[in-house]
Image (spheres, helix red, strand yellow):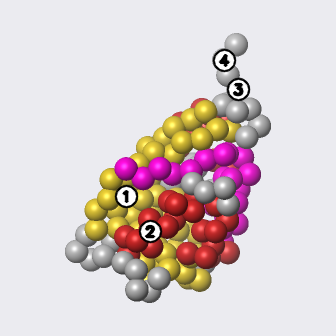
Amino acid sequence: MPTASEIVKRFYEFTQSPDPGRIADLLHPDIEVHTAPGLPCGAGGAFHGADAALNGVWIPVYKVFDTAPYDETWQETTDGTVVVTGRYRGTVRATGRAYEAEFVHLWRVIGDRLAWLHQYTDTRLWHEALAAPAP
């Protein structure tokens, strides 16, 4: 069976692939997702269950942004939490405006599925990418 870190690594591989929808295969049916308040597209908050997380976070974000999280550092805590830091990089689909925002993801895995995510990111940078450029 893969380790927790190996399962989490698949999430980043899938989100950086041409078909980020593959992340659905990684989600535990009862996943708890806590995203940064104020995340654009109504994607900030708490979501329970794979369908709620997909429809509340990833699908709305991917409709507006061509984006992916790029992992940089990894730590696994003694309780099995996987801590990943990195940067979201991408563009706003409608304008092509680029953005980059740091993140911290805290993950827990049950079996071979992602069961819990707590996300921290600078939502201001996401909103600035959506704003019209200054004249």
Q: Amino acid at mark 3?
A: Ala
- Mark 3, residue position: 132
- Label whose residue precedes the other's in the sequence (1 or 2): 2
Work out whether residue 15 or residue 44 is closer to the camera in this orientation and state it. 15
The image position of residue 44, as x and y in percent, is: 58, 56
- Mark 4, residue position: 134
Within 10 Å of disc 4 (Cα), the crowding (few <14, some 14-19, many 20+) is few
Q: CA distance from mark 4 to mark 3?
A: 6 Å
Q: Amino acid at mark 4?
A: Ala
Can residue 58 be seen by looking at this rendering? Answer: no
Dot in front, 2 or 3: 2
SS at mark 4? loop
SS at mark 1? strand
Judge left or right: residue 13 versus residue 98: left
- Mark 1, residue position: 84
**Mark 1 near mark 2, Cβ–Cβ under 8 Å?**
yes
Q: Is residue 15 magenta?
A: no
- Label whose residue precedes the other's in the sequence (2 or 3): 2
- Mark 2, residue position: 8
Dot in front, 4 or 1: 1
- Label whose residue precedes the other's in the sequence (4 or 1): 1
**Mark 4 near mark 3, Cβ–Cβ under 8 Å?**
yes
SS at mark 3? loop
User: Which residue range is magenta in the image?
Assistant: 52-72
Query: Which residue occupies 46% across, 58% down?
Result: 119
Question: What quarter of the picture does the N terminus occupy?
Answer: bottom left
Q: Amino acid at mark 1?
A: Val
- Label whose residue precedes the other's in the sequence (4 or 2): 2
Q: CA distance from mark 2 to mark 3?
A: 35 Å
